[in-house]
Image (cartoon, rainbow, N blue to C red):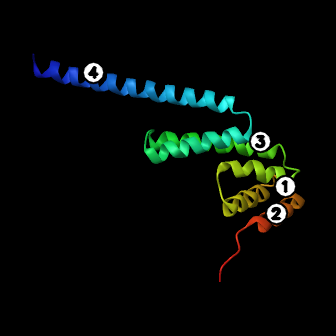
Amino acid sequence: MSTQEVSSDGKLAASNELRAERQHEMRERTIFGLALALATEPSKLGQLRQMLMDLSKLQVLPEEFMTWACERVDERLLAMALEYAHDAEVLLQILSFKGGRCAGLLRDIEDLYQQEKISQRVYVTAKLLLRDFAPPKTE
């Protein structure tokens, strides 16, 4: 076997390995897309997000996939929440399925208000609701 044949076989093997890896990644994303499509309730999306976080801790899936998947869940939750942009309580409840704490919810509400996706009335009501649920500050 010549050096050129060995080099060619090595490139072919690397190309096949890369192709198989891409196909595996596409399958992962397709399966995740199906799971996302099936989760029509915010609580189910919250469960899906929590499952992703648990898998992330176990380092079962690649970090790049985990980041991508969590972003898709968060986008879906935000879209659902904005359907209730007129109701601060429901908006906060849906956003809470992103798994954040009061500070994260407050940041989400601030962002939505700055982007003019919620009214000032909803913004103020949401901030008041969050203030009532925020843990007391220690001095």
Q: Answer whether labels 1 and 4 touch (C-beta < 8 Å).
A: no
Q: Picture quarter containing residue 38? A: top right
Could you tell which of marks 1 and 2 lies nearer the N-terminus? 1
Q: Answer whether labels 4 and 3 touch (C-beta < 8 Å).
A: no
- Residue 67 visible in the displayed image: no
Residue denoted by label 1 = 88
Give the quarter of the figure containing the N terminus.
top left
Could you tell which of marks 1 and 3 lies nearer the N-terminus? 3
Residue 50 percent across, percent down from the top left: 59, 45
Residue denoted by label 4 = 12
Three-letter amino acid code of the residue under disc 3:
Met
Question: Could you tell me which residue is drawn at 66 percent across and 43 percent down?
Answer: 46
Please state which of the two labelled residues, at mark 2 or mark 4, is closer to the viewer.
2
Q: Answer whether labels 1 and 2 touch (C-beta < 8 Å).
A: yes
The numbered disc on residue 69 is none
Could you tell which of marks 2 and 4 lies nearer the N-terminus? 4
Residue 20 percent across, percent down from the top left: 38, 24
Q: Picture quarter containing residue 73? A: top right
- Residue 112 visible in the displayed image: yes
Residue denoted by label 3 = 80
Residue denoted by label 2 = 129
